[in-house]
Image: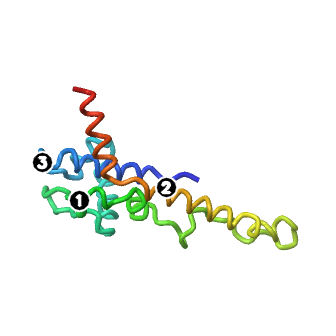
């Protein structure tokens, strides 16, 4: 299992918008330059973030704006927008284990609760971090570069 790079790209997008909002119109082309990827990929992620009402994208060269204060957008909010999990379950269980096998007929009973607990722990930890943490962390890093 691995969360796709779309999640970290989305966090990169928010950081760019925050850092450059007063200097540039932050467009998909601008973001693609910072992230070093195709603008089409950026536009797909921007669309997902927009559907989640986390950002507003002005068409053309209007740029991206963040819809809420950074402290009110958690990593979990971004994760939910970018990595929606099927049926609410992070772990996709293999289909139809053999009921004739003692392991096959009991594997769900053995693992379901544990996997749900792991997912809940990860999601709860994501709720502890906000985009404001990225803002302050980036400010510290940029100050050290000066």
How dense is the environment of label 1, judged by Cα within 10 Å: few (below 14), some, or many (20 and up)?
A: some
Residue 83 rendering spot, x and y as whole percentages: 45, 61
Task: State how far apart marks 1 and 3 are (Cα).
Answer: 13 Å
The residue where tag 1 is placed is 66
In the rendered view, would you say 81 is above or below 14?
Answer: below
Residue 98 rendering spot, x and y as whole percentages: 81, 70
Task: State how far apart marks 3 and 2 are (Cα).
Answer: 31 Å
Location of the C terminus by quadrant is top left
Residue 68 rendering spot, x and y as whole percentages: 25, 63
* Secondary structure at numbered mark 1: strand
Residue sitting at x 29%, y 36%: 140
User: Quadrant location of residue 101?
Assistant: bottom right
The circle drawn on residue 22 is 3
- Left or right: residue 113 compared with residue 6: right
Looking at the rendered image, the disc whose residue lies closer to the viewer, 3 or 2, is 2
In the rendered view, would you say 15 is above or below 75?
Answer: above
Residue sitting at x 14%, y 59%: 60
- Left or right: residue 119 compared with residue 138: right
The circle drawn on residue 125 is 2
How dense is the environment of label 3, judged by Cα within 10 Å: few (below 14), some, or many (20 and up)?
A: few
In the rendered view, would you say 126 is above or below 116?
Answer: above
Residue sitting at x 12%, y 48%: 22
Mark 1 / mark 2, whichever is N-terminal: 1
- In this rendered view, identify the residue nearer to me: 65 or 122: 122
Mark 1 / mark 3, whichever is N-terminal: 3
How dense is the environment of label 2, judged by Cα within 10 Å: few (below 14), some, or many (20 and up)?
A: few
- In this rendered view, identify the residue nearer to me: 136 or 53: 136
Task: State how far apart marks 1 and 2 are (Cα).
Answer: 23 Å
* Secondary structure at numbered mark 3: loop
Q: In this figure, which colouring scheme has been used for the structure?
A: rainbow
Looking at the rendered image, the disc whose residue lies closer to the viewer, 1 or 2, is 2
């Amino acid at each position: 299992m691995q969360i796709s790079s779309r999640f970290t790209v989305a966090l990169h997008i928010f950081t760019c918008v925050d850092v450059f909002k007063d200097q540039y119109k932050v467009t998909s082309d601008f973001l693609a330059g910072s992230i070093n990827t195709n603008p089409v990929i950026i536009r797909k992620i921007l669309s997902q973030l927009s559907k989640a009402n986390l950002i507003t994208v002005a068409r053309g060269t209007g740029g991206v704006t963040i819809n809420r204060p950074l402290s009110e957008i958690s990593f979990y909010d971004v994760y939910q927008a970018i990595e929606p999990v099927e049926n609410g379950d992070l772990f996709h269980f293999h289909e139809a284990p053999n009921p004739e096998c003692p392991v096959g007929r009991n594997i769900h009973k053995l693992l379901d609760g544990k996997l749900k607990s792991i997912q809940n722990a990860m999601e709860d930890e994501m709720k502890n971090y906000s985009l404001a943490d990225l803002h302050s962390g980036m400010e510290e890093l940029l100050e050290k570069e000066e």
